[in-house]
Image: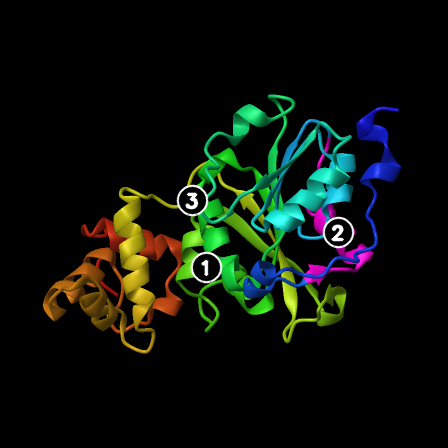
Amino acid sequence: MSPRRNARALAPRPKRHAASGKTRALGQHFLRDDAVAERIIGEVRPTIRDLVIEIGPGLGALTGRLALAAGRLLALEVDPAMAAALVERFADAPHVEILVADARSFNYAGLSALKPDPAGRVLVVGNLPYSVGKPILQALVAAGPVVDEMALMLQKEVAERVAAGPGGKTYGSLSVLTQLSCEARLAFTVPPGAFRPPPQVDSAVIHLRVRRAPPVPVDDPARLRAVVLAAFGQRRKSLANALASGLGLGAERARAMCDAAGIDAGRRAETLSLAEFSRLAQDRPHPGGGS
């Protein structure tokens, strides 16, 4: 029987292994709810034309299902003992590769060349450890259009920040910098009972569709990032004061930046749209004048 069709070999198995010290240190909680696993995979609907990158496969709750659906599966597991167990489990599945790798520093640039079909997609799926979920997300966003879609489990608080729009306390630099690169949607929440051991907080799955180009003009990505981080660096301050502090500018220079972008210097960062951050980073007169 073809390894790819060997459902018995690839099907989810009972999770009997204990978490290693490294995995516990990362704050990993292992998914044990089959219905949640199916919903996560349903967010990206992998096919045999697609390359799927699974981050943090752990005990393999998602891995078997992904192996049955994807044309090629590359699983990144930081824990050598867990990776070894998965290598043994998928020894008869040549389209599945398990790597001992840290998803925060993995080189995603060459993924397109690994697709089983040039017309296929690069998909990323993962139940991310709470303690490193944000830097993994940032590394994936930085990879740019080499990735097409993602379905990622995060701590609910972080997922809400990723998908938040302007005007609320959850909207911040993570929201802006992610949404410049991706269409972000909070897909569904997951209760603690879906994991072993149960976490202290709820989790949530976000769906990210990577943009081919930013939705607003980005003349200088590094400057835009610096402006966004400075604006949210001291959220309680007015925009001008936060920029002055974060960018090392004089107060008058910071107010002039706001005026040039047509933005009231007394506003707070959480009220600004992506387009307004774009204008602020351009630092040249806006046709509409000050507001």
Which residue reaches farthest bottom? 236
Q: Quadrant of residue 50?
A: top right
Badge 3, how many Cα within 10 Å: few under 14, some, many 20+?
Answer: some
Model colouring: rainbow
Query: Which label belongs to residue 226?
Result: none
Magenta segment includes 209: no
- What span is in magenta? 30-47
Q: Residue at x 63, y 74 (%)?
A: 201
Image position of 40 with respect to 242: above or below: above
The residue tagged 1 is 175
Q: Is residue 143 left or right of residue 33?
A: left
Using the numbered discs, state the Cα–Cα distance from disc 3 to disc 2 in whole angstroms.
27 Å
Per the rendering, the mark at residue 142 is 3
| SS for callout 2 | loop
Residue 80: percent from left, percent from top: 60, 48
Amino acid at the residue labelled 2: Ala
Q: Which residue is mark 2?
A: 61
* Sooner in the amino-acid sequence: mark 3 or mark 2: 2
